[in-house]
Image: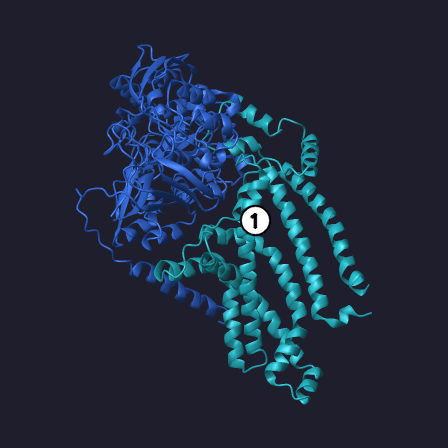
Amino acid sequence: MQLSRPARLTAWVLALATLTLTGCGSGKSSTVAANAKPVAGGSLTYAVNTEPTCFDAHISPQDITGEIDRNVLDSLVSEDSSGTFHPWLAASWTVSSDLQSYTFDLRKDVTFTDGTPFDAAAVKANFDSIAAPATRSQYASSLLGPYKGTTVVDQYTVRVDFSAPFAPFLQAAGTAYLGFYSPKALAAHSNNLCAGGAAAIGTGPFVFAGYTKGQSAVFTENPNYAWGPAGAAHSGPAYLSKLTFRFLPDSATRVGTLTSSQAQVIRSVPAEQVASLKRTPGVTVKELEQPGGAYNLWLNTTVAPLDDQRVREAIQRGIDIAADVKAVYFGVYPRAWSPLTPSTQGYDAALVNSWAYNPDLANRLLDEAGWTGRDAQGYRTKNGAVLSVEWPLLPAEYITDQRDVLGQAIQADLRKVGVRITRPQYDIGTYLQRAYGGKEGILDSSWSRDEPDVLWLFYNSASISAGGQNATFYKDATLDSLTAQGRATLDKTARDQSYGKVQQQVIDLATTVPIYNPVTIVGEQNSVHGLTFDPNDWAVFYGVWLS
Amino acid sequence: MRFRTKVLAPVARRLASALAVMTGAAAIAFAALQLVPGDPVQILLGQNNTASPEVRAQIRARFGLDESVPLQFLHYLDHLVHGDLGQSYQLQQPVSGLISAQLRPTAQLMAGAMTVAVVLAVSSALLTAGRRPVLRAAAGFCELVAVSAPSYWVGIVLLTVFSFQLHVFPVAGDQDFASLVLPSITLGLPIAGLLAQVLREAMEAALGQPFVLTARARGVGQTGVRLKHALRHAAIPLVTLTGWLAGSLLGGAVLVENIFGRPGIGALTLQAATNKDMPVVIALVLVSALFFVLISTVVDLLYLLIDPRLRTG
């Protein structure tokens, strides 16, 4: 009894705190009409959950690096949410019929914030630097694909050549990872652009004013900016005079800064807090489905018992995905039907409802595969061996979206059809070694990128290697040629067709079990106007103004 | 002469042993990191990475990871002797710059937490030691709550009330004095609870000693007895425990820095250890070894200050 007293008090205080937290929000209401005229000035704080380990978009593969650098680095083209490309630093461009050569006519009025003019030589300096092995680019270099070289045709015309047809290049050229640093900064600071700060000089609407590790990165307006992407609501300087990225890994703290007006926009609202935040006056919640790979389970086709297609199919059909996803994510994340998310170009909507939960079918398939015995715990056996599959857990600090909890629901479902799923937790080094060495039965991951070419990463047999992402370890000539075809054409219908076939086939082969479509949840105060999102769901602050 | 033998000699001895402690700590940390499985380059690149084998080889060569392990250690020591702590694998920046930028906010947080802890503990013990059972029970209960409440929860409650609702303090970060208050209370509260319990017990033991009766007989008032005699007597275990707890603050700082979005060594340590970022880990081990040596030296000096009996003979 004695011991329960502090516990009871704790419960009371917690209840009281929760009541205060949810009960009284600051009741500000937005009275600004939708067509109000933008006002220049003011500063905005954007609270995000992760902090870049490296601010150099040419080196770092991190999403947050791309989102932050977008404010400083402009690109040749800009892609809108429908997948159409618009002129940006390139006024126009032509693509050779073999898709191996892209020629860009550059704008002539663009300068970097250190005064250097932006020209063909700057494009060449940046792309060559990304491709150079000494740069140790972890992601941008792969966006350049089979890069051969860049040629300065004249001061404002530049040609980029590839050694093989490379259709995804325009999409890649529109990302911040292939954005442009001032050639002077590139030469002088090539070793410390990772540290961020004033050394990172671009042509963008903001200037990187300063960075305090563990706290914030601060940007100020570039007053000379006059080259916003075609299709943007305006083309002059940004309205905000100051933009602060605040790094707050704790989600309760992040939500609190929004409701108490210490931040105007926050990213990664946890699914369980969406409903209560929507009820908070003065705050709007936006849910954006991420493009790219859904959260998928990859079944390794080279290890027993998953080398048997019937077992794989039984796993695919024996998980009550819709119920599990709804329970864990409160209906905020939709269940997935394809390895691609619906907002990705080339998504095959025909897969919806085509492989619904069917435990009877799962049981029948496992019987057919010979797993007819049962052990004391109810798991299926064959010749004395238990039907057991290993699906390792990532170390706790790498687990996002409560995927470990979702995994428990999946584990419980499969237990009902007699499949044992073991989930050992390794340190990250062991995990990566075993997982990408093909030693594990199941792996799980999602992959955010607005380009169906991610299917090449997932399913081409050339992607089974160091740096490869093919966790099905399935080598198939049809999948190889289909994923390669998509790379070699700009014809949307042809691309949709070959990517559609890939999605269909991997579901039929049951090498993949799509689980849910990740959603980016952003909370913003109603005083924020003009916040848009690029195709990767990253916040774009160029057109934002405050009332 | 007395000052030299009593104060300077132990300090010199401390410094000599500090050097040995730090070299040993560096060697052990290096060896431990070698035993942790996993390739640092693969960990650095993470799960969703498409870097080619060529890029991987470049990274390996850049950090000297292509050399044999003993050679790596010798190279590291060589750089260390020349004052170079190396480059972080993960952050690709010089370690010395990283640590010096993060040291001040953590030092401030720890000093703030210790101040909160000592002030609360001493006040609580002074006011309640040897008083009515109801008062003692109430204080004991508060201390128990302070010790057992997880700092994560305390931090969120403090933030909710004082930052989100009352707008008294900012969501910390590291801006000004106001941003230091809530994190210091969060980190200092459990220590205050622990110290208060120990101090009260020691004070009550002291209050029962014959010298208290003598002091009272000389006409010293209740407050004077507590402040001048009992507290000083009871302070020795308090100082020992405080020094020991101060060393452990580094661990607690990780959580607090995370909740309040404060820069600091704690977050850096966690990140470096999970990512096998060898140069950062070893440098941090060196810093904390130095910190422990400093604390125990200060504690020894405080003994001399508090207890005159140690200064004679």
Residue at 63% x, 46% y is B285
Query: A114 above or below B128?
Result: above
Which is more toward the observer, A407 or A41?
A41
Q: Amino acid at mark 1?
A: Leu
Chain letter tied to cyan: B
Q: Position of residue A390 (x, y in %)?
A: 48, 36
Query: A188 above or below B217?
Result: above
Chain letter tied to blue: A
Q: Position of residue B253 (x, y in %)?
A: 53, 53
Task: Residue under label 1, please give it.
Answer: B103
Q: Position of residue A44 (x, y in %)?
A: 33, 46
Which is more toward the observer, A457 or B40?
B40
Q: Position of residue B266 (x, y in %)?
A: 54, 49
Which is more toward the observer, A303 or A415?
A303
Query: A203 above or below A213?
Result: above
Residue B283 visible, this orientation: yes
Residue B50 visible, this orientation: no
Residue A38: quarter of image: top left
In screen coordinates, is A428 left or right of A487?
right
In screen coordinates, is A47 left or right of A490?
right
